[in-house]
Image: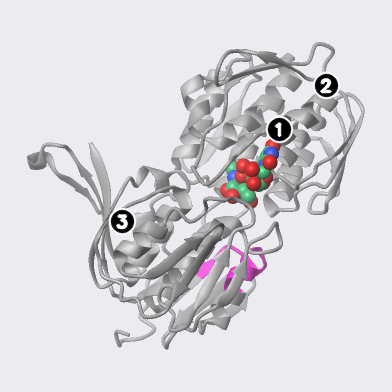
Amino acid sequence: MENRIVVMGGRPLNGAVRIPAAKNSVLPLLAASMLCGDVRLRAVPRLSDVAASLALLRGAGCAARWEGEDILVSGTPQNSSLPGQTAEQMRASILFCAPLLAKLGRAETSLPGGCNIGARPIDLHLAGLRQMGAVEWEAGPGRLVLTAPSGLHGAEITLRFPSVGATETLVLAAACARGTTVLRGAAREPEIADLAAFLNRCGAHIQGAGSSTLYIEGRRNLSGCVFSPLPDRIFASTLACAVAAAGGRAELSGCPASLYAPVLEILEQMGCRVEKGGDSVRLSRFGRLYGAGRVFTGVYPALATDAAPLLAAAMLCAEGESSIEDVIFERRFGCAAGFERLGAKVQVNGRTLCIRPGGVLRGTELAAPDLRGGAALVVAALAASGTSVIGHPEHIDRGYAAFTEILSSLGAQIRREERSRNPSAKKTSSKKQNHLAIGTKRWYDTVI
Ligand code: UD1
């Protein structure tokens, strides 16, 4: 089966979307559920990374299932080996090790995979766990075994870089460790605060989440809870960039503007109109887009690295020059080749993508290089005239549920095709999932 997304671009977007829960919050919450009793996570998007996380939980012996849009997790882990193939598929599988260590004193996994956007070591996770009493064992190529012969204990740990994943690993390890952990140099991303809020609701004692120093008093046992994960600021950024690129107007509700303020600020400087209210944003672009000049990513609250390719897709449509440097990952702009195929004038210099005006975007055949790069190609294709076909949408499925349906609800001409290698068995999926679209109004009647 060969799947692809087909986009007929050049049409403005128009409508309203409720932003779903954040992948980067749901995955650590699912790992954390192993430490707790019965957990219900509300309104979780059906992402392939979520399916992989449920497989990891089940592989460890927990019960994990869908009930409507919610996920229910129960039981404590019985088996310290995570299913290898599943663990290899995604970077976040490393987060499941600390709870196994805390509960069973042992964790075995394959080294984590994920998007090919640069080196993604786990040295910070391992160094922190070692300080808390964990020992690593040789386990053959690509395999990792961790044990905690005397259990995990609190420690004073300073991260040399505020890694999101390492902060989450160490919060998970410390929540049930003996004694107090002080974690300095921690990541301040909102997903860390969400994880701490969830664990505290389950009886943990974590202070300082959202700042760079966390204080965690270990608790032997945690209970379960019902929890609604944070909205997905990268999903909201994606739709905001799509409206900027294709033109039109959209109301994005359920995600406060403060969670993706840098994206909104840059789009506003480029000529979009941004109206913020409560937990919603109305973003419109009816006139020309100006170049953004030089833009950099950074750790929160700076511009998120995950938003960089999406913003770059909007920059392709600007009349002036833009450049965007990702200081977090060295190969963030795998989508540049696709941008060029579409007709954009782009160049990658090290970690910087430079975009010159004058390119004319025309639909063509593309391949999603990774999760955010794939979504960025969809955004660029929405702005291009004619038809684009985007292969390897499985990268996009890791982080976007019902992506084509949501964009269709905004008026995009987009569909998903599942093609068998035998062309006569072609199947098209264009079923609308209206639970995320909250009505489509026409706010304008001219095509830009
Ligand atoms: C998480 C997000 C990802 C986002 C990234 C940065 C999830 C599931 N994924 O990934 O979408 O792009 O944060 O905001 O939440 N590093 C080390 N050693 C380590 C760990 C990280 O050197 O042990 C380096 C990495 O190579 C990278 C930087 O730290 O250059 C950021 O990585 P990190 O914050 O850990 O990202 P992830 O947790 O993998």
Task: Mark 2: give few (<14), some (14-19) or many (20+) Cα within 10 Å.
Answer: many
Farthest left residue in view? 424
Q: Nearer the viewer, residue 179 or 46?
A: 179
Residue 93, how many percent across, how many down? Answer: 58, 31
Per the rendering, the mark at residue 188 is none
* Amino acid marked by disc 1: Asp
Label 2, label 3: how far apart the Cα atoms are: 48 Å
Q: Where 82 sits versus 314, above or below?
A: above
Query: Bounds of the magenta span?
Result: 252-264
Q: Nearer the viewer, residue 198 or 85?
A: 85
Per the rendering, the mark at residue 432 is 3
* Amino acid marked by disc 2: Leu
In the image, is 46 to the left or to the right of 255?
left
Ranked by sequence position, the earlier of labels 2 and 1 is 1
Q: Nearer the viewer, residue 16 or 241?
A: 241
Q: Nearer the viewer, residue 164 or 441?
A: 164
Seen at 11% across and 37% down, the residue is 422
In the image, is 162 to the left or to the right of 76?
right
Nearer to us of marks 2 and 3 is 2
Residue 166, how many percent across, how many down? Answer: 72, 38
- Determine whether the residue tagged by mark 3 lies in a helix, strand or loop: loop
Assess mark 1: CB under 8 A from ligand 1? yes
Residue 338, how many percent across, how many down? Answer: 35, 58
Residue 200, how many percent across, how many down? Answer: 79, 40
- Residue denoted by label 1: 123
- Magenta region, mostly helix, strand or loop? helix
- Determine whether the residue tagged by mark 1 lies in a helix, strand or loop: helix
Label 2, label 1: how far apart the Cα atoms are: 18 Å
- Residue denoted by label 2: 152
Task: Mark 3: give few (<14), some (14-19) or many (20+) Cα within 10 Å.
Answer: some
- Determine whether the residue tagged by mark 2 lies in a helix, strand or loop: loop
